[in-house]
Image (cartoon, rainbow, N blue to C red):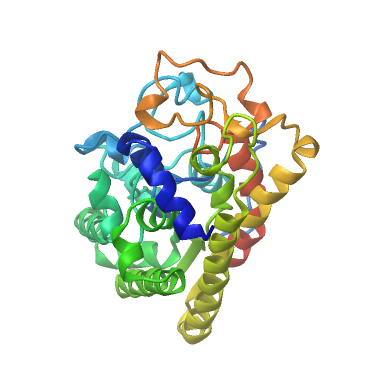
Amino acid sequence: MSVSARMKSNVCRHSVSLLLLFLSAFFFPRAEALTKQRGSNLSVSAVLVFGDSTVDPGNNNYIQTAFRSNFPPYGREFENQEPTGRYTDGRLATDFIVSYVGLKEYVPPYLDPTLSLEELMTGVSFASGGSGFDPLTPRISNTIEIPKQVEYFKEYRKRLELAIGKERTDNLIKKALFVISAGTNDLVVNYFTLPVRRKSYTISGYQHFLIQQVEQLIQSLWDQGARRIAFVGMPPIGCLPVVITLNSDNALLQRGCIEELSLVAKDYNSKLQNKLKAIHKNLAHLGGKIFYIDIYGPVTNMIRGYDKFGFEEVANGCCGSGMIEASFLCNPNSYVCPDASKYIFWDSIHPTEKTYYIVFKSLRHIIDMISN
């Protein structure tokens, strides 16, 4: 059975509510004991973040959407066990990044109305859980599309200009590190689960469409003064617990990764990497640094060699059954595993803080290169 045929069959067998759970997306970190390591000689003025739930620290708290995580057990390992709106038990990779470059401990959501000028100046996240590069993706979940995130960034610039002047703002943006993490929802939800895009695009054509959106985003950020941009690739999407549940012949007993779906993400990553290399080459003489960050490899390594990293569970999340729960289905009434550090995934879609931290460690050399 082809990949598309497999997914069409599964859509018929599962409810819309389960399908929409995909919208929360994948990805990043934790540290059982994050040392106060700082990058040496890094000159980063701020960390500015765009994307989906892998880097949303709570923007969805401030919009009308069901896709939130600002309630227990989310945030169980965060400071004061606070459920901030991060889709994990603790910190995200971007939190570890902003700490590593010595700015602060966490990246706050831009839509938080209580942010101080200092918080704004050292970096914020514009990301929204459920978003994607495809403009159709966030419309399904009523979350913040990436062009709107760019509009918020322009608003952010104006707020800084009023507070510290245009020259200082320009310099701050020039030295800022931009991190973009999205794409999983586009493939998992918008292409393979819902029928609209599959009717219009082959998988190769859809990947090309997403790369075009990436190019437009880079151009938009470049026009606003961005010069250091890091794009995060996709994880092995076939290894997400919810994807396994909806695509396994026996979801209770056969919990292996759906390799054909992961290979689609791997192929997209290759195309993205090639495009970013070409853009970097064209912009380097103007001071542009455009880098690709691989997470497919680190996550795959954790799944295959889980015992080497201290993991015991790789195919189920810590929350609930770990096979289907995410966002509002992972809630204060859910069973939660006693030790999330033994799990790669926190819920059926998102990694634990420990997983995010291991991924962060794998990308520190990129942060060093782009920040010097």
Quarter of the image with the C terminus is: bottom right
Which residue is pictured at 33% across the width and 52% down the height? 194
Looking at this rendering, what residue extends furthest in the right direction? 308
- Residue 341 in the image, given as x and y percentages of width and height: 65, 28
Instruction: Using the rendered image of the protein, determine whether residue 65 is visible from the camera's viewpoint.
Output: yes
- Residue 283 in the image, given as x and y percentages of width and height: 46, 83
Q: Is 222 in front, or is 51?
A: 51
Which residue is pictured at 45% across the width and 51% down the height? 7
Image vertical order of residue 236 relative to residue 22, above or below: below
The mark total stands at 0
- Residue 86 in the image, given as x and y percentages of width and height: 42, 35
In the figure, residue 310 lies in which quadrant? top right
- Residue 25 in the image, given as x and y percentages of width and height: 43, 45
Q: Is 232 in front, or is 107?
A: 232
Looking at this rendering, what residue extends furthest in the front direction? 1
Asked if residue 113 lies left or right of residue 235, the reply is: left
Instruction: Using the rendered image of the protein, determine whether residue 168 is visible from the camera's viewpoint.
Output: no
Quarter of the image with the N terminus is: bottom right
Q: Is 18 in front, or is 49?
A: 18
Which residue is pictured at 63% across the width and 46% down the height? 257
Asked if residue 358 lies left or right of residue 86, the reply is: right
Image vertical order of residue 29 relative to residue 362, above or below: above
Image vertical order of residue 72 relative to residue 139, above or below: above
